[in-house]
Image: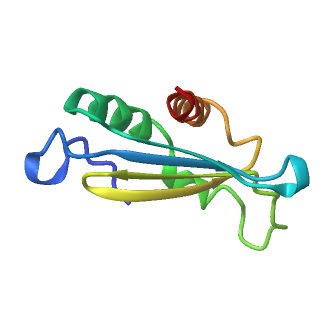
């Protein structure tokens, strides 16, 4: 995964799609929220939220051989030049992750 600032092919209005899921809660059910950009301006805003998240740090946050942690949520983002995925614990879902998660949930509800 890369964090190139410009989309491949110079297409600033290419579609950005983000999906957030959360497990646990009632009966361990998984809830999902998804958004897809509708315009070039919309795509730029979603791309900025996606790029602010430390995607590469999620897989390396747990030391090799450490006990598995309970993953409570996952995020998947597709931007014009890459597809990214992260599994997050409750503690990791803060800062830019929380901003992205809340924005997706709000947009999907609206």
Q: Position of residue 43 (x, y in %)?
A: 29, 35
Quadrant for residue 30, please give it. Answer: bottom right
Q: Residue at x 81, y 66 (%)?
A: 68
Q: Position of residue 16 (x, y in %)?
A: 33, 45
Specify the farthest residue to the right: 27
Number of labels in the image equals: 0
Q: Residue at x 85, y 46 (%)?
A: 25
User: Closer to the camera, 56 or 50?
Assistant: 50
Specify the farthest residue to the bottom: 65
Q: Residue at x 66, y 33 (%)?
A: 94
Q: Relative to 87, does residue 110 appear above or below in the rendering?
A: above
Is residue 11 toward the left or the right of residue 87 in the image? left
Figure colour scheme: rainbow
Specify the farthest residue to the front: 110
Q: Residue at x 76, y 53 (%)?
A: 23
User: Closer to the camera, 65 or 69?
Assistant: 69
Quadrant of the frame with the N terminus: bottom left
Is residue 62 toward the left or the right of residue 68 in the image? left
Q: Position of residue 14 (x, y in %)?
A: 20, 45
Is residue 41 toward the left or the right of residue 19 in the image? left
Q: Relative to 51, does residue 88 appear above or below in the rendering?
A: below
Is residue 27 toward the left or the right of residue 94 in the image? right
């Amino acid at each position: 995964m890369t964090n190139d600032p410009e989309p491949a092919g110079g297409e600033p209005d290419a579609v950005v799609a983000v999906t957030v899921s959360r497990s646990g809660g009632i009966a361990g059910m998984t809830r999902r929220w998804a958004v897809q950009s509708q315009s070039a301006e919309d795509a730029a805003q979603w791309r900025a939220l996606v790029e602010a998240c430390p995607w590469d740090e999620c897989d390396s946050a747990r030391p090799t051989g450490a006990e598995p942690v309970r993953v409570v949520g996952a995020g998947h983002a597709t931007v014009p030049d890459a597809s990214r995925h992260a599994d997050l614990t409750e503690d990791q879902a803060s800062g830019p992750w929380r901003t992205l998660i809340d924005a997706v949930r709000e947009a999907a509800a609206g």
